[in-house]
């Protein structure tokens, strides 16, 4: 199964996994949680207890106006999630590359006066 692996502080990479629950749990480092934050039929799979375990903050999830509504802690991956199905499948090459660009900028998070500030690091400027 083709996934997009997104690790904290790293550039996202397309990767092949066997698609078993065990392989998914190994990637996220524990019990999986599945989110569907995109209009596309794509699942975001992360560690269910990432924030409770204090895993490093990875990437922000934003609404249609670009406002942050959540932050994913720890390593996560994206895979295909056909509508009306409870199974996962490979990302198409096109979808994988589109989300690779979406998550290309690494993000650092700072807590200032009780608020979290997101600082995006544009990888393209480092090249």
Image (tube, helix red, strand yellow):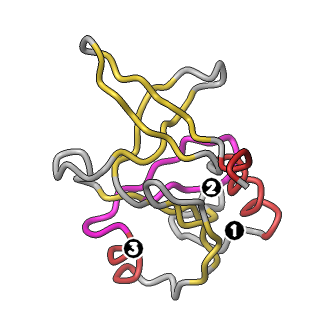
Range covered by the magenta-colored residues: 28-45
Q: Quadrant of the N terminus?
A: bottom right
Q: Is residue 45 left or right of residue 3?
A: left
- Residue at horizontal 53 percent and vertical 84 percent from the top: 17
Q: CA distance from mark 2 to mark 3?
A: 17 Å
| Circle 3 Cα neighbour tier, 10 Å, few/some/many (<14 / 14–19 / ≥20) | many
The answer to whether 92 is drawn above or below residue 69 in the figure is below
Give the structural element (helix, strand or loop) at label 3. Answer: helix
Residue 25 lies in the magenta stretch? no
Q: Earlier in the sequence, mark 1 or mark 3?
A: 3
Q: Which residue carries the number 2 mark?
A: 42
Location of residue 113 in the rendering, given as x and y in whole percent from the top left corner: 26, 11
The answer to whether 108 is drawn above or below residue 14 in the figure is above
The label on residue 91 is 1
Q: Are marks 1 and 2 in contact (CB under 8 Å)?
A: yes
The label on residue 27 is 3
Give the structural element (helix, strand or loop) at label 2. Answer: strand
């Amino acid at each position: 199964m083709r996934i997009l692996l997104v690790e904290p502080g790293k550039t996202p990479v397309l990767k092949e996994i066997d698609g078993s629950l065990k392989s998914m749990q190994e990637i996220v480092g524990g019990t999986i949680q599945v989110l569907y934050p995109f209009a596309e039929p794509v699942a975001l799979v992360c560690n269910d207890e990432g924030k409770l375990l204090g895993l490093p903050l990875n990437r922000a999830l934003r609404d249609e106006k670009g406002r942050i509504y959540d932050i994913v802690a720890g390593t996560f991956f994206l895979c295909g999630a056909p509508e009306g199905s409870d199974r996962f499948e490979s990302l198409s090459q096109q979808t994988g590359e589109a989300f690779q660009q979406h998550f290309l900028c690494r993000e650092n998070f700072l807590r200032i006066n009780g608020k979290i500030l997101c600082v995006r690091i544009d990888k393209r400027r480092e090249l």
